[in-house]
Amino acid sequence: MRSAILGFVIGTALLQMQAALPSLVFMGLLVACALLPPVVSKFIPAFTKFSLARYTMFMVCGAAAGFAWAAALAHTALREELPSRWEGRDLTIIGTIDSLPHRFEQGVRFNFAVERALPVENDKPVVPTRLALSWYDGFRGDESSAVGDVQPGERWQLTVRLRRPHGNANPYGFDYEVWLLEQGLRATGYVRPAEKAGSGNRRLDAFVLSAGSVIERSRAWLRARILAALPDRPYAGVIVALVVGDQRAVDQSDWKVFNRTGVSHLISISGLHITMVAGLFAAAIFALWRRSFFTHMQLPLLLPAQKAAALAGAAMALAYALLAGFGVPAQRTLYMLTVVAIALWSDRLAGVSHILCFALGLVVLLDPWAVLQPGFWLSFGAVAVILYATVGRSRMRRQAAPVTHGWLATLKSASHVQYAVTVGLVPLTMLLFAQASLVSPIANAIAIPLVSFLVTPLALAGSVLPNPLSGWILQLAHSLITQLAVFLEWLSALPWSVWSAPVPAWWMFAGAMAGTIWMLAPRGLPLRWLGTLGWLPLILNAPAAPREGEMWMTAFDVGQGMALLVETSHHRLLYDTGPYYSPESDGGNRVILPYLKARGISGLDGIVVSHNDNDHSGGALSIFDEMRVGWTASSLAFESAIVRAAPNHRRCIAGQSWSWDGVRFEMLHPTAVSYDSTKWKPNARSCTLKISQGGHSILLAGDIEAVQEDELIGSQGNNLQATVLLAPHHGSGTSSTEAFLKMVKPELALFQVGYRNRFRHPKQEVYERYGNLGIRRLRSDESGAIELRFGTSVSSTEYRKTHARYWYSK
């Protein structure tokens, strides 16, 4: 059974790597293959006597079943979609608030369960049953669009504008589209001011009874109590995360500390927290049941206390997991505790490996997209490492060294487990995050007992007890977290706190895992230290770079904005930093930094911020905060916050030039005198950079418009010619004149634009102008990140094609 479950997980993971879903015929063949074991056992009984053959057969058949099952669920999920003709149109819908709302500076976000859509001009819209909506305060200055006080379970009538699921597609980036698919959200959108009288955005019912509404309203009530007791406290969001699993109020600066110290798994409802709470509740029920709750009912005669405690512990685990939002760690722990409870009730002892495999299979059965989450592999990987390093060894150690007693034995065992988890998960964390915390053993030695056995129980008790006792207890929990944060910030600031390296190749990861297994093997095996040799490729892994005289360029998919990384053999330059999305999110920390860290790039030699527009400069501060930068060039005013934070800032001035590793860089615009004029918009001063490698070049023109294009034609002439052109101003109607394009003569044009952006870039007539001149066109909303390789020729790759997945919007 265990081999079949492992095969099921492997088959599910293989399905999630496919560019297209299999046909129903192929799925039928897979189902037939999955039914092979009982047929073989019946007609070829001798075959099943060979262990290796039997295990292989069960694993292959399990993989077939997993592939078919995941494909069936994917077909079902993708069947519900928003027709393209209803995108971007005002629709009036009625439904219920289906999630815990998240309030932010500009408004509120929530999921919406659609009950019906009102007709539009006698035509009934086709709308998915669940939507992800945002409601912005003062929509474009319209006071009538003030955000409503939405609460889970309420029924509302809303006027919305929707679009099909679409997210930025970048190497090593977050896949928003598959996340929406997993959550069952088949369209996104925002609330619009209602224009027709009587059809305004309004609450229809205060509460619609359903299991989901009760759970989400309970979570909202608990969150409100915590925030009311801890107003403006810096770690109130952490307390909320520990009680209801909502991590969105935790500051990004705090996440940075938690990640660098390796304790981020504790800042949520983890498996350890659920086990602890369920265990405490089960122990209390066991003690009370044995005493019949201090009555004369003689309850142990009706039901043994062990079974009552097991049932109570499983019920508490279920309740806490539901409060947590039912994440993968919570599911894993719930299923494992449930199996233990069932085994106890049925008087059958279940092996720990069977329990783990059952939980693994059940998680994937119910959510086949869970295999795409890092938390899935870390959660089950941690438990697997603990079992491998401890099960079956404690007894031998006691026989060999009977003097270890009491707390000393407990401390030694806990230290061994922490060592095993730290070492055992290093290859996996490097594969998933390209970094591993070197201070995590110290941080977790303090944080695990403090958070799990003090802060979490206090937070739970404080969230339900009456005032003023509730406030006192929550204040105490917050005080403990505050003290812990001071210690973690000190650890995080140590220069050696984190080891970073490029994401390893599969063979590096496999070698490191083999070495780890050998290092954690039982003491009887000789030369366990040789396992460290398996880590050598991981340790020596260096960032990839172009060869001398060649150049790489990556145009990121940052939505409506610009950001390009230029690499030579020993230098790297970033041109623009992407847009500002929200106070906690921008193109720098959401797209560029994850890419650089996954590549093992720890510094940039230079950054060019073309001009002050938000979609070009929005990520600069995040990059300055996280990345070592040699110098910064921009056309921004000296009083700009970006200029004040920029290392070695200089102004972009036409005539500047330099060479890196055989590649020449020339600044063509703006002129020095343009800074003395007040008539120009920031677009007019966009830093325009030409980069030449051999007989090929790329022209990065920022947001220059027709006037500046004409000036460049006059001042640069044939020097404007380039193999690749970054379309000026995203292909707006005010740029890319025919005269300019004929002077540049590009073979390829890149358009960095957002999907269905409100500016409608690129303009249709401009886009067609490029095509009519025979220029090949690539756009980031269709291609995702675009990578160019400049050598003897120029080659291009599109991320949405090289990394095609069946859920990508077509």
Image (tube, rainbow, N blue to C red):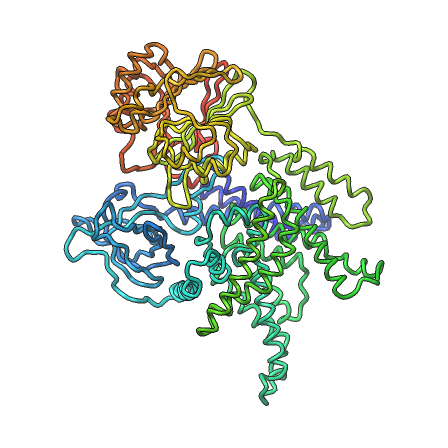
Q: Residue 565: x, y in percent?
A: 46, 27
Determine whether 777 is above or below 204 in the image: above
> Residue drawn 78% across and 50% down?
522
Judge from the rendering whether residue 202 lies leftward or rightward of residue 615; answer left or right: left
Q: Is residue 211 visible?
A: no
Determine whether 131 is above or below 540 in the image: below
Quadrant of the drawing holding the N terminus: bottom right
Residues 122 and 166: in front is 166
Q: Residue 32: x, y in percent?
A: 54, 47
Residues 294 and 643: in front is 643
Judge from the rendering whether residue 627 lies leftward or rightward of residue 697; answer left or right: right
> Residue drawn 39% across and 45% down?
583
Q: How many marks?
A: 0
Q: Residue 618: x, y in percent?
A: 38, 37
Q: Is residue 445 visible?
A: yes
> Residue drawn 34% across and 62% down?
151
Determine whether 334 is above or below 7 in the image: below
Q: Residue 14: x, y in percent?
A: 54, 41
Judge from the rendering whether residue 374 lies leftward or rightward of residue 621; answer left or right: right
- Residue lying at the far left in this picture: please name it: 197
> Residue drawn 39% across and 24% down?
651
Quadrant of the drawing holding the C terminus: top left
- Residue lying at the far bottom in this picture: please name it: 296
